[in-house]
Each structure stands twice: as C-alpha cells, then as structure tokens.
Image (cartoon, rainbow, N blue to C red):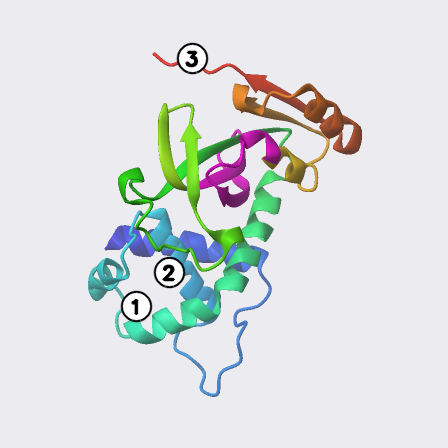
Amino acid sequence: MHNFEANYNKILETLQLNIDESNFITQRRKPKLSDIELIAIDLTAEYMGVDSEHQLFRDLQSTRFFNLIDRTVYNRRKRGLVNHIKKIRVILSEKFNQFEDYFVVDSMPLEACKLSRSSRSKICKEHFHSAPDRGFCASQQMHFYGYKLHAVCSVQGVFKSLDISKASVHDIHYLKDIKQQLSNCVLLGDKGYLSKSYQIDLFETAKINHYGLKIHSF
C-alpha cells in the first residue's frame, strides 16, 4: 500500500497548507490521529476509488495507520466531521478555481431504484420535498426514478459546486443558483441549458456569459 501512503502524504500536505486547524472537535483524550489526518485518509480513499469502509480497513492493514484507529471509532468520528469536510471542500475548491474563467455545468441521473419498482419503493419518501420522482435523461435517452445530480466544475476538472434535485426538475432551473456562486466568467453547458431569458439574467446580475452547446452522439 505504498501508493496509499504516498497519496495520503500529498493530500495531507495540501490540507495543512490551506487549513489552519488540526482538530475541529474537542475530545477528552487526545486521539492518535488528528481530525485533519482522519479527513486526509477519507479523501485518499475517495481519490483511489475505495468506496467501501470494509475494503479501506483491509487495505490499511499493511500501512502505518492500521493500529492508529479502530474502524468503529473511524466511522463515528467521520460522521461527526461531515460539516467540516464540506467546508474544507469549499475552501479547496475556491483555492484551486480562483484564477479560472471557464466553467462547465451538467447533470446526471441518480437512480433510487428501477422504474418497475418505483411504486413499491419506500426510499426517502418520508417527506414530499425530499422524495424521489420520475425524470428523463436526454443524453442517455432513458426514463428513471430517483434524483438528479447537478454540478459545476472548471475546465481543469475541479468541482465548484454540487447539488441534488428531484429527477423531474429541468436542468435549466439550476441556473437560478449559479449566479450566487459564479461571476465574471464563461459558463458552458449542453442544449438543455439554453434559455435566452436565463442568459440575459446571468450576464446582467453576475457578468456570466452562458453558452449552450449542442452535444453530438456518435
């Protein structure tokens, strides 16, 4: 797992250069791993495509981290750091994108279950405003049941913002929030984001030049 430790060291160094604090949550006993080190492990796992906590701790057995934290403690502390991790992502995004003039907006379907099971599914149906529904993905020519993930990233691939909506929400409505996040730049999107009124509003309120591009499939 030399690659894990090498990537961890680079990520931790980047965090320490941009984040002043090492611990965000006060604990009675000083932990062997600081909060920033735990976050670095979590981000390293994401970077390397390790999407299972079980797999992560199996991989960590051959590293210096294995005896530093128990899996249960890691999971509990990581849940407690969720809001701090979000803030760190925003700080790093602002840092990496501060000289960017071009951004790309797009969306993708997040299926909660197959359409055939949607009427029986109870996933996230406790509240109407957060419940999944049916939508259509034009790029994949498919109907689906769930949500939409909306994202804005720089042309270098650094995400500026992420948001989730019901599947039925048209892509164009996400542009309402973008003028609160960007200014003085060029925004590129596919033809699903074409709207003369939105283009005028984005330019007049935030000096955002918005272009809808026709994407061809081959």
Residue at point 43%, 43% (across, down): 133
Of the pair 100 and 84, the residue shown nearer to us = 84
Q: Secondary structure under badge 2?
A: helix
- Neighbor class of circle 1 (other Cα within 10 Å; few <14, some 14-19, many 20+) is some
**Mark with earlier residue (1, 2):** 2
Residue 149 visible from this viewpoint:
yes
Residue range corresponding to the magenta coloring: 147-173
Q: Amino acid at mark 1?
A: Phe
At which x and y percent is residue 126? 45, 60
Residue at point 53%, 60% (across, down): 16
Residue 41 is tagged as 2
Q: Assign the C terminus to one quadrant of the image.
A: top left
Residue at point 42%, 12% (across, down): 216
- Neighbor class of circle 2 (other Cα within 10 Å; few <14, some 14-19, many 20+) is many
Q: Secondary structure under badge 1?
A: loop
Of the pair 68 and 77, the residue shown nearer to us = 77
